[in-house]
Amino acid sequence: MNSFLSTVEKLPKGHPVEVYYKESDLIQELLLELADANPVEDFQKYFNIFNQLTTIEKRFARKENQLFPYLEKHGWEGPSQGMWSFHDNLRAQIKLLNDYNVEKNTAKIIDNIPYLVEGIKRLLSIEDMRLFPNSMELLTEEEWKDFYQGDEEIGWMLTEKPEPYPAIVTVEYVHPSEDFSKRDLTFSLENTFHYDEGYMTPEQVNLLLRFLPIDITFVDENDKVIFYNRGDDRVFPRSKGIIGREVKFCHPPKSVDMVLRIVAEFKAGTKDVAEFWFNFKGRIIHIRYFAIRDNDKKYKGVIEMSQDITDIQKLEGQKRLLDWD
């Protein structure tokens, strides 16, 4: 018995075969206890042991519904025929003993218990010498990983539920700012561009900019407007005619001098940010200008960002829960 144990001991916890051998240990303990139990002297003790042993039905069902179908796929049909019949014989013996238990016919119980004990011992021996070694040879690792859910639905003889297989890895939370892992990309790079951090297609970039709740206008180093985002609720309207236009012609005369000074200071490198806020049509508007520079600190333009902050200014206290319901 347990000639295959040295191989089983190397299996990961929760592997279906490792679990079968844990059950085998339990069954052998129960068989020893059952052989020593005397239903005449202490019927309840005998009955408790017997009932625990009858949970072997879960083991039979897992083999028949989980293991045997995989073995059939690999061309080994013997267990589905011979061993299943063996299970049925043991089921018949258990049923017979259950009938005697109801009657408390201790004479018949004592006469028939040895047949059940020897039958289960023989089954365990065949499992150890043939069934499980051959199963390990035939089934792939990926196939063994398919077992847990079905095994769980049927159940085990063990008092403690086996660990999932494959093991569920608990990943400790890592703040995004501290995550420097390099991962295999799970998305296609077709038609994408590589930005400083990540990849996006032109369509994704366009959608991102369109749905930002901020108006953006980008003026290049030559003072020409080269981009604006087309949101549904822009603070200040824009049209296609602005593209290629000089920035000084894109603002009302009363504010042009201020805009030109901002651009001049940005180009000179003396300033990097300018911001304003004011009332506009009953709303509070926040406007910011940012100097854009490359890695060598060379001026590459200015970005203007406008945002309606009326509702933001009304916020008080804190909100940590979703209130959709």
Image (cartoon, grey):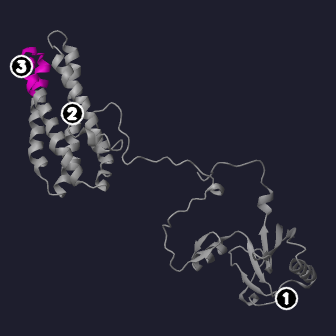
How far from the left and from the top, in percent, is residue 59?
A: 22, 38
Q: In which quarter of the image is residue 181?
A: bottom right
Label 2 to label 1, Cα distance in Å?
87 Å
- Residue sitting at 79 percent across and 88 percent down? 224
Residue underneath mark 2? 56
User: Closer to us: mark 2 or mark 1?
Assistant: 2
Check the image and report above or below for 145 versus 289. above
Q: Which residue is rendered at x = 30% and y = 32% of the image?
A: 158
Q: Is residue 272 left or right of residue 64?
A: right
Q: Do the residues labelled 3 and 2 touch (CB within 8 Å)?
A: no
**In the image, which residues are magenta?**
96-115
Badge 2 element: helix
Sooner in the amino-acid sequence: mark 3 or mark 2: 2
- Mark number for residue 249? 1
Mark sitting earlier along the chain (2/1) = 2
Question: On residue 111, which mark appears?
Answer: 3
Q: Nearer the viewer, residue 318 or 202?
A: 202
Q: Give the residue type that dot 1 points to.
A: Phe
